[in-house]
Image: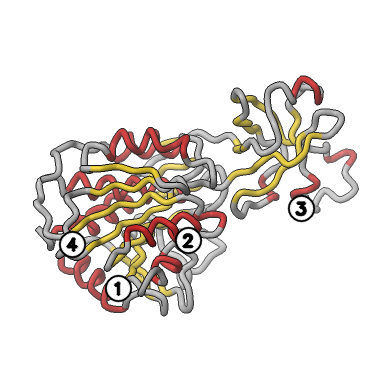
Amino acid sequence: MINKSSFDIKQALMSISSAFGVSGYENSVHERVIFHLEKYAKEIKIDKTQNLIAYVNEQKADRKTILIDAHLDQIGFVITYIDDNGFIKLGELGRSDTRLFSAQSVTIYGKEQLKGVIASLPPHVKNDSKKTPKLDEIYIDTGLSKSELEKKVKLGDAVLIDSTPVEMLNDRFYGRAFDNRCGVVSVLYALSLLCKKQLNCNLVVQFSSQEEVGTRGAMTGTFKINPDEAIVVDVSFGKTPELSLEHTAELGSGVMIGFSSVLSKRLSKDFVKLAADENIPYTIEVMASSTGTNADPISQTNAGVEAVTLSIPLRYMHTPVEVIDISDVKNTGELIAKYIGRYA
């Protein structure tokens, strides 16, 4: 039986989303997730690609294996060059929007954490103030000379734009890394709801690495787990004034249940029916030929895996001020728990 434990969604969201853990450097956020995860899992492992994998109950060969996946990494940057004046150039770890960079403060994760700012020309001396800078035109200024800087950081060290998660009004939150730390929190919440259940299935949770740079962790981790079914939790596009509801969902409208050619129609329909039966708010998200999530490689692993996506609506994706509604995180976790609870 899974150990009983209470779970504070808001506290977990604030703690986990504020941790450093860009693609390929996820080990830094593992400790904060394990703090919660160890209350619900029999065994926790970290594999060669930095996936954090939890075997929730005793694994038996004669039972169905269900995988719950949520990627743990966040977008960020890596130092690629330090010029003779001590200015730092960057490479991307995940897709970002250079329109947001000008005059932002950053943290460099080197031998020690080092603060810097992204250099910005004053509008008085710009030739074209409307031009969006390219990544190779962007520099970080730490105030240090090259020789001083090289004592503290090196090529390959990671960089993040500074942002602290903040609770807004009406249960809205903004911060960096809600893509996909809010999905991680929804999975942890689901486990807390299942804590009294004796499950007649093998339940495995994978907080996967490197999703933002090519869904790499999901490929390797799922191959080892070899599940029969997979529930992939991520974020998707929340409604904003310039976007129509055709490709988005309102914040607070519930979990977005995915339909796609790469997903299991049986599972997608089953989750829609379950949400309706349990009065859990939901919307339907159609993604045609692929989902752009870990469900794509997971569904093709080994001899194939039946997969479904459950997504949390999020505004301003891949920025330092991603916005979510905490009710969507809760409803996603509840729907997962209701589905897994069928095996009790």
Q: Position of residue 227 (x, y in %)?
A: 29, 64
What's the distance in space between the residues labelled 1 and 2, CA to CA? 19 Å
Amino acid type of the residue tagged 4 in the rendering: Ala
In the foreground, 140 or 149:
149
Q: How many numbered discs, if any? A: 4
What's the distance in space between the residues labelled 3 and 4, CA to CA? 55 Å
Which mark's residue is nearer the viewer, 3 or 4?
4
Q: Of label 4 and label 1, which has the lower sequence position?
A: 4
What residue does disc 3 label? 132
Crowding around mark 2 (Cα neighbors within 10 Å: few <14, some 14 to 19, many 20+) is many
Q: Position of residue 37 (x, y in %)?
A: 28, 40
Q: Are dots 4 and 1 in contact, CB under 8 Å? A: no
In the foreground, 222 or 324:
222
Q: Which mark is residue 237?
A: 2
Q: Of label 4 and label 2, which has the lower sequence position?
A: 4
Q: Position of residue 152 (x, y in %)?
A: 68, 23
Amino acid type of the residue tagged 2 in the rendering: Phe
Quadrant holding the N terminus: top left
Amino acid type of the residue tagged 1 in the rendering: Ser
In this picture the colour scheme is secondary structure
What residue does disc 1 label? 268
- In this rendering, the answer to whether 264 lies above or below 249 is below
In the displayed structure, does residue 29 sit left or right of residue 150?
A: left
Q: Could you say whether the residue bearing mark 1 is in a helix, strand or loop?
A: helix
In the displayed structure, does residue 130 sit left or right of residue 43?
A: right
Q: Position of residue 100 (x, y in %)?
A: 66, 46
Q: Which mark is residue 61?
A: 4
Q: Residue at x 45, y 61 (%)?
A: 219
Q: Of label 3 and label 1, which has the lower sequence position?
A: 3
Which mark's residue is nearer the viewer, 1 or 2?
1
Which mark's residue is nearer the viewer, 3 or 1?
1
Amino acid type of the residue tagged 3 in the rendering: Thr
